[in-house]
Image: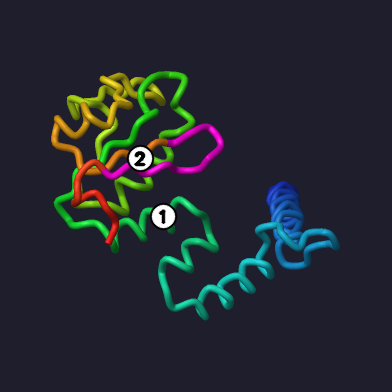
């Protein structure tokens, strides 16, 4: 009777072990043509490369441009600079919100706004608020720098006051 109870446990253990082996094998021993894939050997090489880069802005530029841009702005803008990101309001612009989240993180404690009244309302992946693209209106409302994000992924910076000019 004891042997009858053990075979399901042995079978489950073999199935779990086989599944684990199938999942880890390509991570440890990647096949050819996987030079840019996020597997363990490639990630290990990337860590070694990044450890050799002392400048955080240069290191971030290797990983992704918006982080490097945010870190560079953090280095060059006064802590009380007020920044407005245009093109973030509305359902059609929800794909742009990643820029807002990254820059809000890197530029803290500065004000980073996406709505003219600075009170955007979040709705399941997009923000409702008062959009603004007018440099003169933003300057009147106390903003120092306007950042526009066209659909091609580049950033256009428009200093509105001397405080918004990166030093």
Nearest to the observer: residue 145 or residue 26: 145
Q: Residue 69 shows which numbered tag?
A: 1
The residue sitting at the right extreme is 32
Q: In the rendered image, is residue 93 in sight?
A: yes
Q: Position of residue 33 (x, y in %)?
A: 83, 59
Residue drawn 33% across the image and 42% down it: 158
16 left or right of 53 in image: right
| 156 within the magenta span | yes
Q: Residues within 10 Å of mark 2 (few under 14, many from 20)?
A: some
Residue drawn 72% across the image and 67% down it: 28
Check disc 2 and report its element: helix, strand or loop.
strand
Q: Position of residue 125 (x, y in %)?
A: 41, 26
Task: Compute the Cα span from label 1 to label 2.
Answer: 11 Å
Q: Earlier in the sequence, mark 1 or mark 2?
A: 1
Nearest to the observer: residue 130 or residue 137: 137
| 135 within the magenta span | no
58 left or right of 27 in image: left
Mark 2, residue position:
147
Determine the image quadrant of residue 38. Answer: bottom right
Q: Which residues are magenta?
A: 149-159
Determine the image quadrant of residue 137. Answer: top left
Check disc 1 and report its element: helix, strand or loop.
helix
Main secondary structure found in the magenta portion: loop
Instruction: Tell me the quadrant of the picture where the C terminus can be found.
Output: bottom left
Nearest to the observer: residue 91 or residue 45: 91
Q: In the rendered image, is residue 111 in sight?
A: no
Determine the image quadrant of residue 155. Answer: top left
């Amino acid at each position: 009777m004891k042997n009858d109870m053990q075979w399901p446990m042995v079978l489950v253990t073999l199935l779990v072990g086989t599944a684990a082996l199938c999942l880890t094998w390509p991570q440890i021993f990647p096949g050819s043509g996987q030079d840019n894939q996020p597997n363990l050997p490639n990630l290990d090489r990337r860590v070694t490369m990044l450890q050799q880069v002392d400048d955080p802005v240069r290191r971030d530029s290797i990983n992704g441009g918006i982080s490097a841009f945010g870190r560079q702005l953090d280095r060059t803008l006064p802590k009380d600079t007020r920044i407005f990101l245009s093109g973030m309001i509305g359902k059609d612009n929800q794909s742009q919100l990643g820029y807002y989240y990254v820059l809000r993180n890197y530029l803290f404690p500065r004000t980073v706004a996406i709505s003219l009244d600075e009170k955007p309302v979040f709705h399941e992946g997009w923000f409702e608020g008062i959009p603004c693209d007018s440099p003169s209106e933003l300057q009147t409302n106390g903003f120092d720098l306007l950042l526009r994000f066209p659909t091609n992924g580049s950033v256009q910076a428009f200093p509105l006051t001397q405080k918004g000019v990166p030093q």
